[in-house]
Image (cartoon, rainbow, N blue to C red):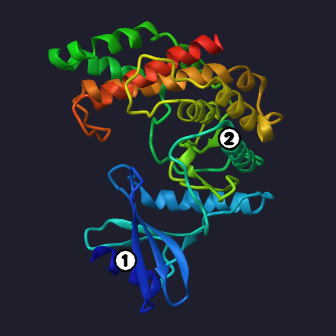
Amino acid sequence: MEVECIVEQFFGEDAYKISPITNGLINSTFCVENLDTQKKYILQKINKQVLKNPNSLILNHLHINCLLESSGYLYEIVNLIPSIEKEYLVYDENFNPWRMLSYIEDSVTFSKVSNVAIAYEAAKTFSHFLAQINCKELPSLEEIIPNFINFEKRMHDYKIALENTTDELKIKAQKEIQIVNLFENLPLKWIKLENENQLPKRVIHADPKISNILFNKNNEALAVIDLDTLMISTILYDFGDMVRSYCNTKNEDEATNSNNFNSEIYKAVKKGFLFYLQDNLSTLELDNLDYAAKVVVYIQAVRFLTDYLNGSTYYSIQYPEHNLDRTQNQLQLLQSMSQYLD
């Protein structure tokens, strides 16, 4: 097997056991136990179609770990494990890159925020992580996903998709298109602040969903994981995406016309996010947290709708209207939260 050949480059002749982990969306992930040492590790095949420069991932990961190790970081650090040949990346016969990471014992992940306490714990953990990696001068990180937080480009891509889509898709998405167009001025302030370099540049996680924190059995945070999306941008994005993913009372795939925004969880997320960052953020950042929450939700709706109009070529779908349901969910979240935040 492909994966067995890779494991042997890390373990040599040691006996091992491989178990697939199936909740990841981008990389292929396995838990590998070295039966001779009785230690577990995480093995991943990096999706080179999405993460086109795996060497940059390794450099960023090592750089951030050095910052965390020298800063009094309170949580466990996921380390890269070198192969027998002292390489952090090994390649299979199809030139797919693989890496091995340390495993944190007795840890669990959540796919959805179930209560205020977990929301607060997660936001506070990300707050500490972000405070520690931004406590010194801005590090030099490799760019992993160009234009990921370029909202001007996201809006441009939407308008191109709208212009070029089929009449059939445009008719089916008529309601969603109308709402997106109704809010099209929402990101203009963000775009202006970015273009004028008014928002401080910081290291952000860029994917601060609840499943990227490991918890123990007492629902206490153990570690922040998945550093693949680390980038230099505005920290407002991390706050906005936390709100987007934590405060939605429905599953992201579920189309809904009813209130799907939990205001109590929002307050917990905001309190946790500011726990370590309050004194580090600029007045402009602090004044625009509520705005960031709304605009990040809006842009995600735009991304889902853009993909739908393009024939659903980017996001994985299980049925033809999947991206349209996702769009409706995000637009309902935006409208629900706007009643609370305005």
Residue plotted at (80% across, 33% down): 278
Asked if residue 260 is positioned above or below residue 82 in the image, the reply reads above
Packing grade of label 1 (10 A; few <14, some 14-19, many >=20) is many
Q: Position of residue 52 (x, y in %)?
A: 38, 53
> Taking 11 as reference, is 225 left or right?
right
Which corner quadrant of the image does residue 255 belong to? top left
Report the residue marked by disc 2.
123
Mark 2 and mark 1 residues within 8 Å of each other at the beta carbon: no
Q: Amino acid at mark 2?
A: Ala
Q: Position of residue 266 (x, y in %)?
A: 65, 28
> Taking 77 as reference, is 38 left or right?
left
> Taking 106 as reference, is 43 left or right?
left
Q: Position of residue 102 (x, y in %)?
A: 57, 70
Q: Position of residue 78 (x, y in %)?
A: 61, 64
Visible in this render: residue 194? no
Q: Amino acid at mark 1?
A: Ile
